[in-house]
Structures are given as C-alpha cells and as structure tokens.
Amino acid sequence: MQTAPASRLHRAVVPSGSGRGIVVQSADDPPTVLNLAPGDTATFGRGNRDAPVDLVLSDAAVSRLAGRITAVEDYWLISNLSLRSTYVIENPEGGGEFVKLAPRRLDMPVPFEFARIVVPSAERSAAFYVFAPQHLYADHQPQPDGSPDATRVAFPLDETAKYFKVLVALCEPRLREPSSPVIRTVPEILDRLGGAGLSRSAVNFHIDYLARTKLRVKAPAAEPPADHEPGKADWQRAALVSLALQFDLVREEHLALLPPR
C-alpha cells in the first residue's frame, strides 16, 4: 500500500481567521481538500448512492461509512464506524509515533498537528491526511538555579559529541521513514559516518555508553548477562532508537550532523 511521502504532500493551509479548525486532505492527485471549522464533521469511506461520504476511499475492503472526523479548536476527534477493521493514525513527523483506533471506537481525540490515517485496504491505498493548527505553548523562561535541588536534565546529551552522531546514525532510518523496521548494525553505523575517526570498537563503546549512562535503557529480562561484549545486543540498539525518538532527543534537523549521502 503506497501513498505519497509526507515531504511531497501539498501542504494544506488551515483556515484563516481564528486560526482554529482543521484541513482533511486525500492522497489523490489532485487531492480532495476539506476545510472543517470547529464543530464541523466529515465522513469517510467507500460510500454509495444511498450513503454518500465527504471523502471517498475507493477500495472494496473499506466500509461504505468507515468513519467520521470532527474538528475541535486545535485538535480533532475521529470515530471508527467499521465493525472489524482497526485504523492507524500516524504522526509522519514524529519518528514512528502512532495510535490505533479500534472498531466502533467513537470520538477519540488526536493530538497530532499533522497525521496520516491508514484504513486497511485490499488493492488501492486507503490513507488520507489531517492538518490541525499549530499547538499553543506556555511562554516560560527557565530560572537559573544553582541549588542542590535544582531540576536536572533527564537525558543530558551533548550534540557536539561523537556518541551523539552515533545515535543520529542509528536513528536515521526511522527518522526518514517512520515505518522502517531497520536497526543499523555497528558496521552500518560506521559506514554511514564515513569513519569519522571511529573504529568498530569505538562505535560499540559509544552505543554501550549511551545505553548505560546517557539514556539508561534496560535489558529485557530474558537477555544474556551484562558480562557479554558491550554494545553487541540487538535489544540495546533497538531500545536506544525507540527512546531517542519517543522523547524527541533526536530530530530531523539532527540529520545535518551526518555526512551527505
């Protein structure tokens, strides 16, 4: 099931005025674009003459009335009206972040500013996009505090350090394609960094340092004991990627730290 990459989408514009409301956009070329003000709804599905929908997903595996979207200020609600199919709402800009929408689940709030909704299909792609307004954030200025009980940084990463470049190279496949299952091996990381003054043992050391000290990932209970060669376990690299992307410790802009491809 293929859809246009997020980077090639026609970026829909959220309606002007109050800055609220959402835009629903199909993956067709040219796309169908629906502007929804707060309180407005749009239906999606295969549709037919007796049950028309606002956004048509022309695949035999899609219900005639598959779901409904409701705009609510700077977020939106989605309902799954299918009896059997689970839908997936992806955040294309979130390093693999997604939520599942169970059959018959009504009015689930979605916090993503930009989302791809994937409806299971048999032949044609049945995905579409939702653009919500930019979220509001508190205007907070950190106060310097040198006291012993000052708030600490949970994950103190130095973005100029070699270990951070190793982490970026490890996360790159997932950053470029959120659904990618690829977890790079140590030789692949070394090759992506073009050497960068690192040896295979140095990359292993940095991975182990990130796992034990910086991000403090924990081994699954069934893993071998810790006296095995550091940095070699698949779980360690996979856990680093998951944690780094989950908490936005590595983001798309950090790809500029890697050598050109």
Image (cartoon, rainbow, N blue to C red):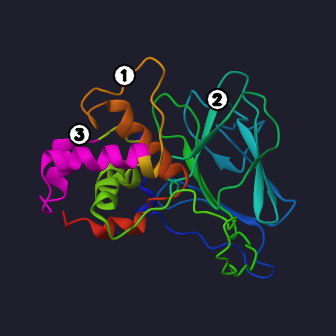
The numbered mark, 1 or 3, whose residue comes first in the sequence reads 3
- At mark 1, the secondary structure is loop
Q: Is residue 55 above or below residue 23?
A: above
Q: Horizontal placement of 255 versus 137: left or right?
A: left
Q: Main secondary structure of the magenta part?
A: helix
Task: Report crowding for label 3: few under 14, some 14 to 19, many 20 or more residues within 10 A (C-alpha).
Answer: some
- The x, y position of residue 14, in whole percent, is 68, 72
Report the quarter where the N terminus lies: top left
Q: Horizontal placement of 4 versus 109: left or right?
A: left
Q: Which mark is residue 185?
A: 3
- At mark 2, the secondary structure is loop
Comparing 171 with 15, the one in front is 171
State the residue lying farthest toward the right: 39
Which residue lies at the image location 34% right of the left edge and 57% below the top edge? 168
Q: Are marks 3 and 2 in contact (CB under 8 Å)?
A: no
Task: Report crowding for label 1: few under 14, some 14 to 19, many 20 or more residues within 10 A (C-alpha).
Answer: few
State the residue lying farthest toward the front: 148
The numbered mark, 2 or 1, whose residue comes first in the sequence reads 2
User: Residue beneath label 2, please?
Assistant: 86
* Residue 192 on the magenta span: yes
Q: CA distance from mark 1 to mark 3?
A: 20 Å
Comparing 225 with 136, the one in front is 225
Q: Which mark is residue 150?
A: none
Residue numbers of the magenta segment? 184-212
Q: Is residue 221 above or below residue 105?
A: above
Query: Which mark is in front, 1 or 3?
Result: 1
Q: Horizontal placement of 93 versus 117: left or right?
A: left
- The x, y position of residue 175, in whole percent, is 40, 54
Q: CA distance from mark 3 to mark 2?
A: 33 Å
Q: Which mark is residue 225?
A: 1
